[in-house]
Amino acid sequence: MSEHNLDARRMLCPMPVIKTQNKVNELAVGDILHVVCTDPGVLSDIPAWARINGHEVISHQENEDEITITVRVGS
Amino acid sequence: MAKQHKAVALISGGLDSLLAVRVLQEQGIEVEGINFYTGFCVEGHTHAIRNHDKEKKKRNNALWAAEQLGIKLHIVDVIEEYKDVLLNPKHGYGANMNPCLDCKVFMVSKAVEWVKENHKDGFDFIITGEVIGQRPMSQRKQTMPIIAKESGADDILLRPLCAKNLPATKPELEGWVDREKLYDFSGRNRKPQMALAKEFGFTDYASPAGGCCFLTDKNYSAKLVDLWKGRGSREYEMDDIMLLKVGRHLRPKPEFKLIIARDAGESKFLQGYRKQFITIQSLSHNGPLTLVDGDINSTDFELVAGIVARYGQGRDAQQVEVEVSVPNEQAQTFQIKPLTTEEVLEEWHV
């Protein structure tokens, strides 16, 4: 299991979802990916993408300008 | 054991693709979805940017549809490849800058590539939610075979909602799909789709007027044409097409235009472009952040400062302090009288 980071700041949905999807495709089952975003749309889109594709959002953190969503790669 | 045939579906997030997938699922066909992001897709960007839209619940309709259907969805970034579709459409444009027929051919051809790559996993054919007569440019009886032929899909392209109005395709001829259980919808009347949605238990679905693409929007298309005219070339980058969705666009001189934020949300969004563009902002009064796109001469700084002051809270003041910032240079400030409504000429508005 390894941890990875993805910078999706200033991207508007669905680009953060696409970047997350493409990064996850390179990772192994169980790996952790932290995605940093600025579009609040990711709060609904990345969890929806994760649910339908078998991955898990294990946390999200919000501050005034940035949102960090952490995804565990599924099978 | 008989081979399990699988389909990939073009998912826009609208009702038709939702129904097309469910029709095949009813026949036991396993489906996965594919959604292409051209950069012009209506995906609630303005919700993400504008203050007054913040309270609206935002969702990506393609992801939402996939979740309703219980299918996987692959979202593919085709921004770069799509440029050639938009700039050189073999079949021309629709009412605005929408190259709908070429766009459909392009997307089906991308799905053909996907099927070839995933054939080993059982994917054999492609489905779309197309309905004959639904759209004036791309979904007509004459265009259906053009899309199948030019995309390279030929007889592996199945349109479950209007299949009975078209020649049988390979999935039907081979018996993978029961043609009798497909549909014969046609025309712009949405009642058959709404009745089928009810039958399947879909009550909440997207049906955006004008489809799911900014290029069908008259105002957006006008801004795109203006951008190309201002630059003297039909080129664009992702930032350009994003910025066409934001702010009030004024072109006081042929060489440059102003992108003036319409609220605090847009000002905040435009802040992200400060290192790339000349920016203008009132210092003495609250006002919108403004970007200058194009080549501006410093002799025009007072003119643009006066325009920007007109859109801030100092619009009625005798004098407003306005800052013009050029990336990597010392900012300049101007004490300026805001232009009047009449002085901001109608023809400047893009």
Image: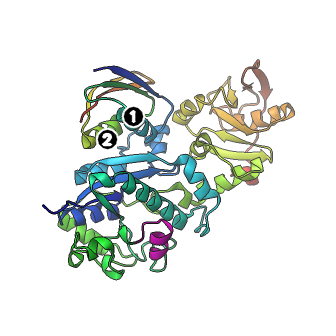
Q: Is residue B296 visible?
A: yes
- Residue range in magenta is B144-154
On residue A20, which mark appears?
A: 1
> Is the residue B186 above or below the residue A69 in the image?
below
Chain for disc number 2: A
Q: Which residue is mark 2?
A: A49
Chain for disc number 1: A
The amino acid marked with disc number 1 is Thr
Residue B207 horizontal/vertical position (percent)? 37, 61
Residue A50 horizontal/vertical position (percent)? 29, 38
Of residues B307 and A4, the one nearer the viewer is A4
The amino acid marked with disc number 2 is Trp
> Is the residue B282 above or below the residue B121 in the image?
above
> Is the residue B193 above or below the residue B265 in the image?
below
Q: Are marks 2 and 1 on the same chain?
A: yes
Q: Residue furthest top?
A: B330
2 and 1 marks in contact (CB < 8 Å): yes
Residue occupying the point 25% across, 26% down: A30
**Mark 2–mark 1 distance (CA, rounded to whole Å):** 9 Å
Quick one: SS at disc 1?
helix
Q: Is residue B148 magenta?
A: yes
